[in-house]
Amino acid sequence: LVVVHRGPLPPDAGRVLRHLQSQEVVEVIDLDLSAPDCPPLEGSLALLTNAVLPRLALARLNFNDLPSLIWEGSVSPENASFLLNPADGGEIARRLLSGDAAVWVVCKGSDKNRIKEVTAILTNALQQAQKTIKLPDEQTQEPYDTPVASSVPLKLSFSVLEISYGTPESAIFRSMVDPITPDGVTKEDTLVVPVFGRGRALHVFAKEAITAEGVKEACEFLCGPCSCEVKEMNPGVDLFCPVDWVSSLYDGAAPKPLLPPLVVPMAVSQPATTPPATVATNDQKIAATTVRPHDHVIRTSFLAAVLVGLVIIVFGTWRVLRSPKGGNPV
């Protein structure tokens, strides 16, 4: 959330800002454009430079690290409440925290017949997926490699959440998933978006891409064997869900590490003047001696040269001893 103003805020707007800053579930940036050290507004957020200030904005950083404006309005208690208690974002978080593997959001378009077609395709595909897809431990009949630390129940369940056409919630949702929305899609088209984890939108299905096969493949991916590295590289965007995920997932306590602390052996001693490097874990910090990579290379090269020299000396001595007296080596 960004509060953009020029000079001191009016009393009412100041109270709204302080209220937002007191919420731990959101990050609030206070930008006073009159301050000499205030950076210039970039990206689509620059549209607020000439707006009637102050303004309250919801923005995100794009893949190019430029801010993108999702929503903006007056700095009022009503707008603050609207952003801190989003109907769709709150419901998505509630369902995910109750154990849904994914919440399939149907952001309705203007064509009512198309909405019925999409809903039927999605409902039938999800029902079939829940019958046929098995969780990794059910496939191998073995437990997960690491225990599930979260208190959220592990179950194979999908639900559908509809967002009405032409509402403020619809406009915000479409803006949030815009980076992963296919070209040519307009606000008149119905979107289908699977949301998983801590409110991450995986993909946007629209138009002819809304098929039973596509829904099934997305479900299999989300419920398949652990693919953390794949999911980290997978295109997707985080939705604005003002929720304390850690407290909700771990009963109010930070998750404990599943692996024992990392132990770094001291391979080579170093002079006392070399500062130790610190390797941090969740529970402790371990001091490890800093080893310069080039030292190892120098030592290895020196030993190799000595070894080659010894071989040459031994071989030369052997040839001399075997040669005839006063003659050439045989």
Image: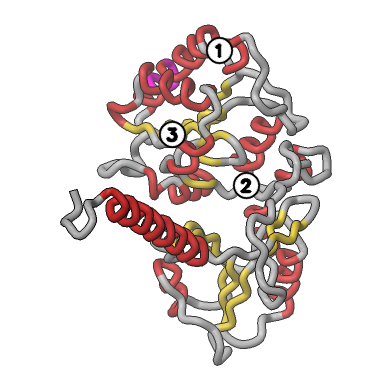
Q: Quadrant of residue 122?
A: top left
Residue shown at the point (56%, 75%) measured from the top left? 4
Q: State how far apart marks 3 and 2 are (Cα).
A: 20 Å
Q: Quadrant of residue 120?
A: top left
Instruction: Specify whether residue 119 is painted magenta.
Output: yes
Categorize mark 1 by other alpha carbons within 10 Å: few (<14), some (14-19), many (20+): some
Nearer the camera: disc 3 or disc 2: 2
**Residue situated furthest right in the rendering:** 252
Q: Secondary structure at mark 1?
A: loop
Q: Position of residue 297 (x, y in %)?
A: 46, 61
Q: Which mark is residue 61?
A: none
Instruction: Specify whether residue 158 is painted magenta.
Output: no
Q: Nearer the viewer, residue 202 or 177?
A: 202
Q: Are marks 3 and 2 in contact (CB under 8 Å)?
A: no
Amino acid type assigned to the residue bearing label 2 in the image: Cys
Q: State how far apart marks 3 and 1 are (Cα).
A: 30 Å
**Residue situated furthest front in the rendering:** 325
Categorize mark 3 by other alpha carbons within 10 Å: few (<14), some (14-19), many (20+): many
Residue for badge 1: 134
Q: Nearer the viewer, residue 211 or 16?
A: 211
Amino acid type assigned to the residue bearing label 3 in the image: Lys
| In-image side of 288 versus 138 (left or right) | right
Amino acid type assigned to the residue bearing label 1 in the image: Lys
Residue for badge 3: 108
Relative to 164, is 224 above or below? above
Q: Position of residue 233 (x, y in %)?
A: 44, 43
Q: Earlier in the sequence, mark 3 or mark 2?
A: 3
Residue shown at the point (39%, 61%) measured from the top left? 305
Magenta segment range? Answer: 116-120
Q: Nearer the viewer, residue 50 or 227?
A: 227
Relative to 14, is 1 above or below? above
| In-image side of 320 versus 223 (left or right) | left
